[in-house]
Image (cartoon, helix red, strand yellow):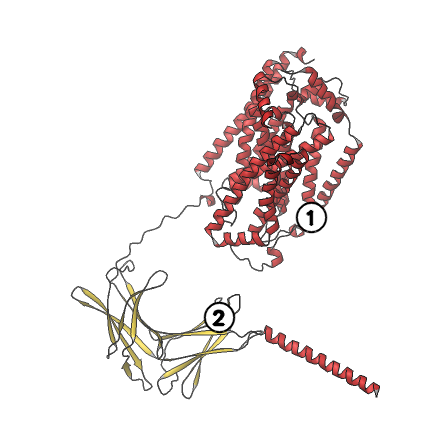
Amino acid sequence: MENKDTKEKLLRQFAPQLEKVSSATLVWILFLLGVIGLGVYAFVTQVTKGHIVTGMRDNVVWGIYIVNFIFFMGMSYSGAIISGTLQLFRTEWRKPIIRMAEYLAIISLLIGPGYILLCIGRLDRLYYLALFGRIQSPITWDVIAISTDIFGCLIFLYLSILRDIASLRDFSELKIPAWRKKVYSMLALGYTGTPEQEKRLRRATDIMATMVIAIAIIVYSVLAWIFSVTLQPGWHSTIFGPYFVIAAVYSGTGVLIIAMWVFRKVYHLDQYITRKHFVAMGVLMVVLAALFGYFTFSDYLTKWYGSEKNDESLIRILFTEYYWPFIFSNYIGVLIPLLVVGIAKLRTITNITLSALVVIVALWFNRYLIVIPTLESPYLPIQDSRPDWVNYTGTWVEFSLMAAGVALFCLLFTLASKFVPVMNVSEMAEIPKPESSELFKAEESLL
Amino acid sequence: MQTQNKIRIIFIFLLCCYNLVTSAQIKKDSATAITPTITFTYLNSNDTIILNANIFDKKEKGVFAIKNAVIEFFASGDKKTRNLGQAKADEEGNAVLKLPVAKGLPQDKDGKTTYTAKFNGKDKYRPALETFTAKFARITVNFSKEDSLRFILVTATQVDRKDAIKPIQKEKIIVYVPRLFNLLKIGETDLDVAGKGKVEYPGNLVGDSLGNIIVIARIEDNDVFGNVQGQSSISWGIPKQYYLAEKPTRELWTPIAPIWMIVTLIIMLTGVWAHYIYAVIQLIKIKQISKKKPDSSS
């Protein structure tokens, strides 16, 4: 049951953002396009000159591209898991932030796989994967899993925005071009909120919420298995699947908090996204920090005690050559959110956002430390492996394409917020049921 | 006068500089030049002399073999020296030379031959040399049965300068059988005055599929004879039952994926896509409902 007045009030508030692009937003978009342009130039350089322009060589065949792939895919699965869980449990405080989680899921999912393509030396042979792909290869599992996930997340997002699209179609005060009205009308599928339509929509949304959670866990586990089914030191671990899933949700929670902070500032959503939401997400981040710390410790502890020659050598490298990144990603990245959210005085919006930023950077380094040091310590010696070939350093081409990916992520997030409100207006306007109202009060008292 | 003093000072200064540079160069050269170490072992096995020179560079970090170093081997007696040949060091630094017949090697008055392994030096490596002196000896292994007991009979002899054969007396002989990774010691005995010794054969040794087993008798690290060994084979071992170990099937290499993988994938994909289709059907039904009530959307 919706409160029409609340809904119209909310639509009125979001209308300016949907109707026009401010000069600040335009500058922001142009800046992002500039960074993407740099990435395009770097890509053309890579295609014309070959992978020699990257830091990847015979030993380290995966570099920053794969790190970014894992990172973006992690954010996507995190978005899917958070939005799916909040949807299923009907958590009251989800309403202003669930749309951001959904955007996070699909936008990251569209960007992440692009980094895999950048790793491929012969893009002209990409279709071989479809022609000669073998089910036995975990890479094939990943292709199947990611494409399945993209469809699932798109359906889930569509189901989630359907009511808002219908509202925008029906909102007469919205001054947008006729073509956009037509697009809204077409995408709304004639939804008017009849009990039958609402029942079917809710059923489909709940089912897809369950599916996106399940798929996210499976797909990110598949990604972890690509590493763990090999015998490489540091990768061959049975806990890599759950470890990757936890790390993904952890990093995604950080990104979601940043997104909440940015949209709250840019769209002046202070009255909707409050400290309560930041604390709720902060608590989630703390739980995930503890789990992430536990998995990391467990993984390295068993390797260290096992004293297997190559594992020992890898751990030595991590504590010498990669000392600070290792300490930052596995200690500081875990302890900062624990302290910020754990100590009541530090639990402010700014502090939680800053600790989320630390988590994001730490988790990026965590992925870097999973991929690069292992490849730098191969089992078999390779002929003519010069030190500058064995040790990996990213080049401007790779960093430009990384920046382009981040810029594209921000651009798509900005554009999506210009098409459908960044908050779920229809859900915000819903009159809470008495029992959920009680639950909401209980949640509030907890936070 | 002043000009002469200046010239003297400049000359002395230049002389000092020259001395500094040359001494630094000498120091540098002596620091970079490496004196390798050679460990030389001698084994006389069934009339074949095996000379093994292991050449390496001993550093603080550890021992580094000098691969491809060419080692020359010599045998010398009282008067003459004979070049035996040369061998190249492998990646572990071992240069091995096998001499099929010991006869005719130069000897001293005691019948001993001095073997020399010589590295002539190359690039940064200085020359190195190591010697080993040994008298030629021979060990023969025979077998005998006495009632239910089985014995290994060892006879050790030495050859003097005039090719006369004499027994080796009072020396210790160790008896081994080769196992998978190393030699297994099964007994030891002291030679009597006739150069003979006897070791009881244990009855629980596994041989090949026919029960054949090799028995090796050795004099080890002897001051006079060095390492001498003789060996013989006998079918006293317990026949080994070979069976074909089941190889793990790496079905990842087969043209078709393992059945369990295909079944799992089909179940998962069917489950997921069935739910997708269900959700899409719900969307289609939402559209159909709106068509039934066209006025409600206005």
Examine the rendering and report whether any part of residue A212 can be seen.
Answer: yes
| Number of on-image labels | 2
Where does the N terminus of chain A fall, quadrant-wise?
Answer: top right
Instruction: Name the residue furthest front.
Output: A345
Provide the secondary structure element on which disc 1 rests: helix
Crowdedness near tag 2: few (<14), some (14–19) or many (≥20) residues, C-alpha within 10 Å: many
Where does the C terminus of chain A fall, quadrant-wise?
Answer: top right
Q: Residue at x 84, y 86 (%)?
A: B2
Taking depth in this image into account, of A91 and A271 the one nearest to the observer is A271
**Residue A239 percent location from the top left of the image:** 49, 41
Q: Quadrant of residue B195?
A: bottom left
Tag 2 subunit: B
**Residue A161 percent location from the top left of the image:** 65, 24
Examine the rendering and report whether any part of residue A121 can be seen.
Answer: no
Q: What residue would you read off at disc 2?
A: B89
Provide the secondary structure element on which disc 2 rests: loop
Q: What residue would you read off at disc 1?
A: A397
Q: Which mark is residue B248?
A: none
Q: Is residue A40 left or right of residue A220?
A: right
Above or below, B175 against A34 in this view is: below
Q: Is residue B185 left or right of residue B272?
A: left
Tag 1 subunit: A
Amino acid identity at mark 1: Val
Q: Quadrant of residue A401?
A: top right
**Residue A191 percent location from the top left of the image:** 64, 17
Q: Is residue B132 left or right of residue A103?
A: left
Above or below, B107 against A152 in this view is: below
